[in-house]
Image (cartoon, helix red, strand yellow):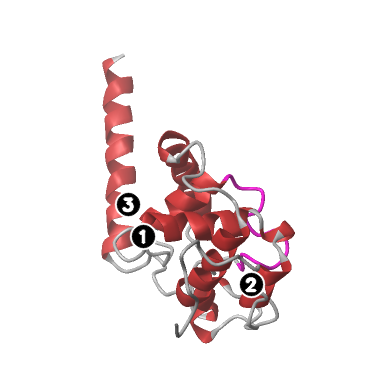
Amino acid sequence: MRGFFAGLVVGIAVILLGLFVYFEQGFAPVAASAPPMPFEKMLARMALHAHLEKEQPAKAGIEASEANYLAGAQAYLDNCAVCHGAPGRQPTPVARGMFPRPPQLLHGKGVTDDPPGETYWKTANGIRMTGMPGFKDSLSETQMWQISLLLANADKLPASANAVLAGQAPTLPQTPPAAGSQGPGK
């Protein structure tokens, strides 16, 4: 029995030494254009989803409204579109040069099947070793929720939000002036 355990310890030590040499000697792919290492995608995806299950908010921090979709569309264009694309636009050189390639969130299925809390968490915290930065220090909580709701509902946005995403001026909903307001220039 002692021989079995000694063999197990030696086997584990050889594997760890082999991994060390693999990385230390520069055999591991590190260029953005290199193919992923064995099990890299599976392990990264598994870790991300396990973490999200523990930390993502259960419900959105703001309501899904046209005003929030419009603000989310503008915040998306200003902060996300360079990597994640916009309707009717080809991926940018930045997006084409990244590894892993950033998903084009408004093309095809995107993240409309993800709960807004998952997208919010990813927007706030970023995703390690993907190029996805965390925005919690540069966007407000409201802006991150607006982007998250926009993406969760991308397949059913109002025409005004789609117009903003397409780079056109939206037709804003008419709101009556507040009581006591004299209007512009008065």
- Does the magenta run of residues contain 109? yes
Q: In which quarter of the image is residue 157?
A: bottom right
Mark 3 residue element: helix
C-alpha separation, residue under disc 1 versus residue under disc 3: 46 Å
Residue numbers of the magenta segment: 104-115
Task: Check residue 172 in the rendering and tell me which mark sits there, or answer none.
Answer: 2
Mark sitting on residue 18:
3
Decide: few, some or many residues near mark 1? Use Cα within 10 Å; few <14, some 14-19, many ≥20. few
Considering only order in the chain, which callout, 3 or 1, is on the residue closer to the N terminus?
3
- State whether residue 185 appears in this view: yes
Q: Is residue 140 left or right of residue 82?
A: left
Q: Residue 81 carries which label?
A: none
Q: Which of marks 2 and 3 is in front?
A: 2
> Residue 116's x, y, as percent?
55, 48
Q: x%, y% of residue 60?
A: 51, 44
Q: Mark 1 points at which residue?
A: 140
Q: Can residue 127 be seen in this view?
A: no
- 66 and 86: which one is in front? 66
Residues marked 1 and 3 touching at CB (< 8 Å): no
How packed is label 2: few (under 14 Cα within 10 Å), some, or many (20 or more)?
Answer: few
Which of pointers 1 and 2 indicates the residue nearer the eye? 2
Classify 70 as above or below 18: below
In the image shown, does 69 or 91 lie closer to the viewer? Answer: 69
Please, is residue 66 above or below residue 9 in the view?
A: below
Quadrant placement of the N terminus = top left
Which residue corresponds to the image point at 55% horizontal and 80% vertical from the top-left?
A: 96
Q: Earlier in the sequence, mark 2 or mark 3?
A: 3
For the C terminus, the quadrant is: bottom left
Q: Where is residue 156 in the image (x, y as percent from the top left)?
A: 73, 58
| Whether label 1 touches label 2, CB < 8 Å | no
Is residue 8 found inside the magenta-colored segment of the image?
no
